[in-house]
Amino acid sequence: MRSVTYSMGVSLDGYIVGPDGDFDWTGPDEEVFRFVTDEIRGVGVHLLGRRLYETMLYWETADQDPSLDDSMLEWAAIWKPLPKVVFSTTLSTVQGNARLASGGLAEEIERLRAEPGEGDIAIGGATLAAEAAALGLIDEYRARVYPVLVGGGIPFFPQHERRVDLELVETRTFSSRVVYLRYRVAR
């Protein structure tokens, strides 16, 4: 069965976006960018909330930007054809290899797990991940912890009163002092 993963950059105090809406501190260096590119190769479908979908729209045409280096062109070449499912109550259409979710999150994940296919089911965006976590649907949490305290904003981890035991699967420290933590939900 395909795993559901939640992977994002996070400040040491637990936020994916600071109180001012800024996340420029998550700009990866070349080493982290290569790592994230390798991670996305293992994704079969990406589930996104509206805000992250709109942020990632840049990559639908990024391959036309002459200023991009080879690593960014490689990312664009992987991201653009990747199937995406967008959860939104305000969008009526989406672009690229994306479709609007036709059902609720649990129903979409159940359907995707039942379909033949390779790769993980990745969840992007804290709001969507919080809903998936509350429903017990996340199999792995993958955090790239940046050495910064932002003091508030949108939290990486969902704020609910349910204990979830985790098993450490992998760690890695990058030369930029970013620390990667990969945890599997203990079931």
Image (cartoon, grey):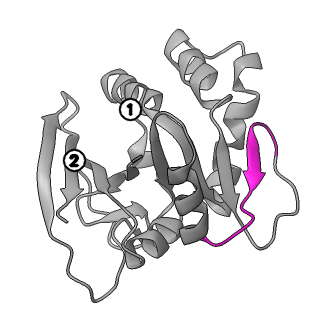
Report crowding for label 2: few under 14, some 14 to 19, many 20 or more residues within 10 A (C-alpha).
many
**Which residue ends up furthest to the right in the rendered image?**
92
Report crowding for label 1: few under 14, some 14 to 19, many 20 or more residues within 10 A (C-alpha).
few
Q: Which mark is residue 182?
A: 2
Type of amino acid at the residue the image marks with label 1: Glu
Type of amino acid at the residue the image marks with label 2: Arg
Q: Is residue 19 visible?
A: no
Q: For the point 15% across and 40% down, which residue is it?
A: 170
Q: Which mark is residue 39?
A: 1
Considering the numbered disc 1 on the image, is that residue within a helix, a strand or a loop? helix
Dividing the picture into quadrants, the one containing residue 92 is bottom right
Asked whether 172 or 43 is in front, the reply is 43
Q: For the point 71% across and 12% down, which residue is it?
A: 66
Q: Is residue 177 left or right of residue 135?
A: left
Residue 34 in percent (x, y) is at 38, 22
Dividing the picture into quadrants, the one containing residue 100 is bottom right
Number of numbered discs visible in the structure rendering:
2
N-terminal label among 1 and 2: 1
Asked if the magenta segment contains residue 96, the reply would be yes
**Magenta-colored span:** 95-104
Q: Is residue 158 left or right of residue 87?
A: left
* Overall secondary structure of the magenta section: loop
Q: For the point 70% across and 52% down, which residue is it?
A: 54
Residue 102 in percent (x, y) is at 75, 65
Question: Relative to 23, is 70 above or below?
Answer: above
Asked whether 26 or 179 is in front, the reply is 179
Q: Is residue 17 visible?
A: yes
Residue 6 in percent (x, y) is at 39, 54
Q: Is residue 52 left or right of residue 160?
A: right
Considering the numbered disc 2 on the image, is that residue within a helix, a strand or a loop? strand
